[in-house]
Image (cartoon, helix red, strand yellow):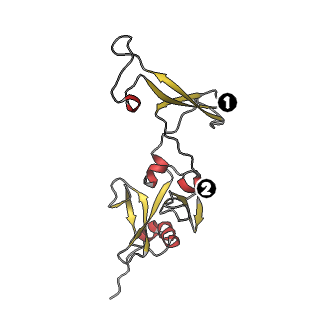
Amino acid sequence: MDLIETVYFGWNPLGHAEGCTNPVWDDAQTMHSEGLRPCAGGDQPHGCAKGDDCTHRDTFDRVQLRLCCTTCGTVHTISGESLTQVISHTSATGWGQPPTQIGEVWLWPGRRTTPSSQPHQYLVTREPATVTHDTLYGLITKYWDADQTPRWIAAAVPDEAGAHHVSSLRWRYSSRGLAALEDAAAWIADAELRAARPLVVTV
C-alpha cells in the first residue's frame, strides 16, 4: 500500500498551455489496439517454443489514454503495453476526496485498509485549499501499541533537517501516541504555539 505522501505527491500533473484560464481536462478517452513489433531478423515472424506464453512475441496489446483541454487546446496522449486497469472510488483511494475540518486544521484522507475502515493516515493543512508541498503542515498516522490499542502519531511543520522522521518525511515536531484522531489534529494545530511557550521553573 502506498504511503499517503505518495498518494498525494507521487504523481506528476499533466501541463496545460501557458495562460490557460480553465486548466481542466474536459475529455478523457482510452483506445485498445494490437501493436506490431518490427522483426529483428529479416521478414520472418518470431517463433518461440513458449507459444502463446511468449512475452517477446511480434504483437502486443497496447492501450492509449488521451486527454483534451478545450480551453487551451492541449491534448496529451499516453501509451503503454499490457494494460492493468483498476476502477476504484475516492472513498477507497482517499485522493480526490474533500478534506475534513477538525478544530483549526483540515485533514486530507489516505487509503482505507478495508472498505468499512477509517483511513490510517491523513495529511494536514491550515486551510481547505488543495494540499501541496507548500500548504502541507502536518501528518497523522495510526498504529497499534503492544496491547493492540489503536494510537495516533502527529507530526507538524515539514522540515528536511527536522529531528523527527514520521512516514517517509522529516518534521520539526512529533507527538507521542495519542488516543484519538481529534487529539492528533489538536496537537498539530497547537504544535508551534506549544514550542514557543516559555519554560516556567518554580523554586
The structure residue drawn at horizontal position 53% and vertical position 52%, both measured from the top left corner, is 131
Q: Quadrant of the N terminus?
A: bottom left
Where is mark 1, residue-wise? Answer: 70
In the figure, 46 relative to 143: above or below?
A: above
Disc 1 crowd rating (10 Å Cα; few below 14, some 14-19, many 20+) is some
Q: Quadrant of the C terminus?
A: bottom left
Q: Position of residue 5 (x, y in %)?
A: 44, 52
Give SS at disc 2: loop
Q: Amino acid at mark 2?
A: Pro
Of 176 and 43, the residue lying toward us: 43
Q: Amino acid at mark 1?
A: Thr
Where is mark 2, residue-wise? Answer: 98
Q: Is residue 68 visible?
A: yes
Residues marked 2 and 1 touching at CB (< 8 Å): no
Q: Is residue 94 visible?
A: no
Disc 2 crowd rating (10 Å Cα; few below 14, some 14-19, many 20+) is some
The structure residue drawn at horizontal position 43% and vertical position 62%, both measured from the top left corner, is 156
Q: Position of residue 138 (x, y in %)?
A: 46, 60
Of 45 and 99, the residue lying toward us: 45
Of 107 and 194, the residue lying toward us: 107
Give SS at disc 1: loop
